[in-house]
DNA sequence: CGAATTGTTGAGCATACTCAAGGAGCGTGG
DNA sequence: CCACGCTCCTTGAGTATGCTCAACAATTCG
């Protein structure tokens, strides 16, 4: 569950135990239901344990803008008590398992475990970095490259939590849902997918994607994982101490 | 300088004095120079005091993706020591005045003044909310609406720091710079601007924009300021205490 | 098996891009 | 003060990309 935070830097086993201890009120959310509604004033932080969810906004013309995908290990709204109300909704795409963590618990953890506090900061800052990358992707890349880039990102993020490898990932998203994130219509995304398949960059099988040659795909996608800020677990902590 | 943070909630005059006290090493940056370079490991937080800057990434094809505009009162990288390296650059668009704040100073302030800490959190979370809105804007709105939305946002943000009013703002950005933020080519943005002018939604005069009827423009832009999370200074604090 | 959802195809149209040329505004230097 | 060069904006023309609508195929699920 907390695998992802291992990439934040230097967590100790005790930190991990403390993090796992947070997960008490586990609950299920059905596909297509909201986990947090737009405008709400939530008093708990949500953590996705299983399934895929998304941040989204409904646009006035009825389109759904998907702003982020949340995969197991992702926090929903660490911050929300500071802002007051949600300016977007969070919805379950597949059936999900979610944990509700009370702000007090988190506050307590942050105050007693500085490394955990830093890891949680890291997590929200990486979310922001992903957002920046999506913005650049949507605004400045051709559609094939755009889709490929999103797939590369999802593959890597899923790999980190043990849900994908170099050659394959299960991705229970419809083409339309990918399109809603990329700003591409459902008809067109189908054609874009075809082009990727024609070039043997991805194969689709059921709800799984197969990558015959990941390096080639990442090259085509102009994918550079730096923005995910993954320091390898166990590696030298990359922190202030090393700043030049 | 700290006007913006008044909208974060309930700062006291003493808090404001403490914030202003941070600004010591003021320096100038010339238009088109970088304030922070991509990949850098900065050890200080930057604050824009005067001028307009932007976060940007250079794309492999040579295009510049503008990811945010920074106006006076905006912080550059409150967070960066947690992430280690910059995944984008920050550049001055006009001549700028910038303050370098040492991480220690900020840390100190955060630990001694909880309201200031909250205000700084608020500031970075609003930046993230703006990013989400830009993503939705670029991916899901037609070009006219897209440009109009950006103009409405900039006008309001500039108004907060006393640099615009309901009818007019000085905006020293080229059309190309607006296009780089919106994912629209320089030729096309000129035509989009023309359409806005034809409908009397904006007039351009030198480097100033005039809004004959702001309500109509905001309506056309589908602009809803909720995402900027501005609680009016002096109003009831919108915080946890009121969560339902 | 049947219904619903998801993906695919074709055709026509709208939007936006590129390339190329020209005009307007501004600052510098003769 | 004018001439020049630079940057920025504008216009036209041709092309590419992506949208909508509509029909149909494939897949999934009850």
Image (spheres, coloured by chain):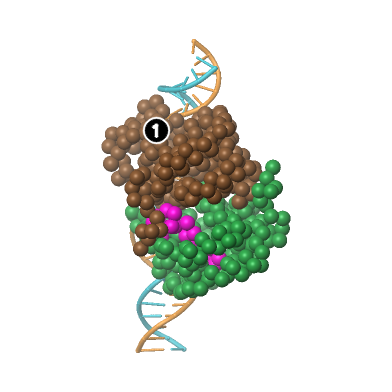
Chain colours: A brown, B green, C orange, D cyan
Q: Which residue is mark 1?
A: A163
Q: Nearer the viewer, residue B92 or A164?
A: A164
Q: Nearer the viewer, residue B119 or A203?
A: B119
Tell me, yes or no, if residue A192 can be seen here. Answer: no
How many numbered circles does the render carry?
A: 1
Residue C14 locus on image (x, y percent)? 50, 46
Quadrant showing the C terminus of chain B: top right
Q: Nearer the viewer, residue A225 or C22?
A: A225
Quadrant showing the N terminus of chain B: bottom right
Q: Nearer the viewer, residue B192 or A200?
A: A200
Residue B83 locus on image (x, y percent)? 42, 53
Residue B78 included in the magenta stretch of the image: yes
Chain of the residue under the numbered disc 1 shown in the image: A
With B114 as the anchor, is A128 left or right in this view?
A: left
Seen at 30% across and 39% down, the residue is A214
Give the image quarter of residue A160: top left
Residue B233 locus on image (x, y percent)? 68, 61
Residue B50 included in the magenta stretch of the image: no
Tell me, yes or no, if residue A106 can be seen here. Answer: yes
Seen at 39% across and 45% down, the residue is A7
With B191 as the anchor, is A166 left or right in this view?
A: left
Examine the rendered structure and indicate whether residue A64 appears above or below residue B98.
Answer: above
Seen at 59% across and 68% down, the residue is B18
Examine the rendered structure and indicate whether residue C7 appears above or below residue B111.
Answer: above
- Determine crowd level at label 1: few under 14, some 14-19, many 20+ residues with C-alpha closer than 10 A: some
Q: For the magenta stretch, what is the residue range?
A: B70-89
Task: Give the prevailing secondary structure in the magenta stretch.
Answer: loop
Residue B140 locus on image (x, y percent)? 52, 46
Examine the rendered structure and indicate whether residue A207 appears above or below residue B97.
Answer: above
Give the image quarter of residue C4: top right
């Amino acid at each position: 569950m907390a695998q992802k935070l291992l990439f934040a830097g230097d967590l100790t086993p005790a930190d991990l135990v403390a993090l796992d201890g947070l997960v008490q009120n586990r609950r299920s959310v059905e596909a297509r239901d909201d986990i947090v509604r737009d405008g709400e004033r939530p008093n708990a932080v949500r953590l996705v344990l299983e399934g895929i969810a998304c941040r989204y906004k409904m646009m006035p013309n009825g389109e759904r803008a998907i702003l982020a995908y949340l995969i197991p290990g992702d926090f929903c709204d660490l911050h929300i008590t500071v802002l007051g109300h949600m300016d977007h909704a969070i919805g379950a795409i597949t059936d999900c398992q979610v944990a509700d963590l009370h702000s007090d618990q988190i506050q307590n953890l942050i105050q007693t475990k500085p490394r955990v506090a830093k890891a949680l900061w890291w997590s929200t800052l990486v979310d922001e970095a992903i957002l920046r990358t999506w913005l650049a992707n949507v605004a400045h890349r051709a559609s094939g490259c755009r889709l490929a880039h999103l797939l590369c990102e999802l593959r890597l993020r899923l790999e980190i939590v043990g849900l994908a490898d170099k050659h394959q990932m299960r991705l229970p998203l419809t083409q339309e849902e990918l399109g809603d994130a990329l700003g591409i219509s459902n008809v067109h995304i189908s054609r874009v997918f075809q082009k990727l398949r024609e070039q043997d960059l991805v194969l689709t099988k059921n709800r799984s994607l197969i990558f015959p040659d990941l390096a080639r795909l990442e090259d085509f996608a102009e994918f550079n994982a730096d923005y995910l800020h993954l320091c390898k677990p166990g590696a030298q902590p990359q922190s202030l101490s090393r700043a030049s």
